[in-house]
Amino acid sequence: MRPSMFANDNPRPVNSILGKRTRLVLVEPDRTESFILERLRSSKRRGIEAYTILARGPELTAEQIASLQQMVFEPLSYYDGRPIFKRLPSIPEFAFRLHRGESTLDLLVDLHNPGWEFCCEAERHWGWNWVGSEMVALAKALFPEHASEHARSVWKRGAMKRLAELAATGAA
């Protein structure tokens, strides 16, 4: 989680960051899917539809959903502008799709440069986060066949390239 030296004495509450519909889906999803993604070169779509799905993972267990909820509902998970530093733009390559009734929430995650994007109907929130290592651990648990055994790498060497080739041939 967020390093204590950056802790904000008065973090913004999550209900002032995420929209009402987004929070409603997150509180009690009926099911949660997982995906490895590749960004389409030019897409005006939002959420997972703006990406090529390279791999579909298993649905999350109750324990994994609870872990995801803990990360998302912790106010200190959200970057609040401190410290000030330069970052490359976030490029999500992993996603969760949460369903609750007729509502769907896409949570796009950059595992290399910790950022996330929430897309739920008309609501959208993008930002950096302090839960990058926790998200990497969850992604590796969901896709163990592609996960790197090395702590500094997310996926095995060549895994993304192989998945992209499979997706291009329609074998994914």
Image (spheres, grey):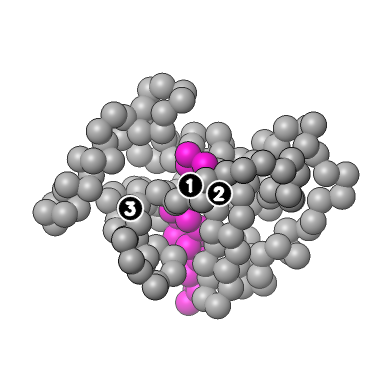
Q: Residue at x 60, y 64 (%)?
A: 125
> Could you classify mark 1 by the number of other residues whose Cα lies within 10 Å: few (under 14), some (14-19), or many (20 or more)?
many
Can residue 138 be seen here? no
Q: Residue at x 73, y 49 (%)?
A: 81
Disc 2 residue type (three-letter): Gly
Is residue 116 positioned above or below 136 on the image? Answer: below
Q: Residue at x 52, y 45 (%)?
A: 88
Q: List the residue tagged with mark 2.
A: 115
Is residue 15 positioned above or below 45 on the image? Answer: above
| Mark with earlier residue (3, 2) | 3
Query: What secondary structure prevails in the magenta region?
Result: strand
Give the alpha-carbon distance from disc 2 to disc 1, as whole Å. Answer: 5 Å
Residue nearer the viewer, 141 or 131: 131
Q: Position of residue 136 (x, y in %)?
A: 48, 37
Q: Is residue 9 left or right of residue 34?
A: right
Please identify the quadrant where the N terminus is shown. top right
Disc 3 residue type (three-letter): Glu
Q: Which residues are magenta?
A: 95-113
> Could you classify mark 2 by the number of other residues whose Cα lies within 10 Å: few (under 14), some (14-19), or many (20 or more)?
many
Q: Residue at x 54, y 58 (%)?
A: 117
Dot 2: element: strand
Number of numbered discs overlaid on the protein picture? 3
Q: List the residue tagged with mark 3.
A: 38
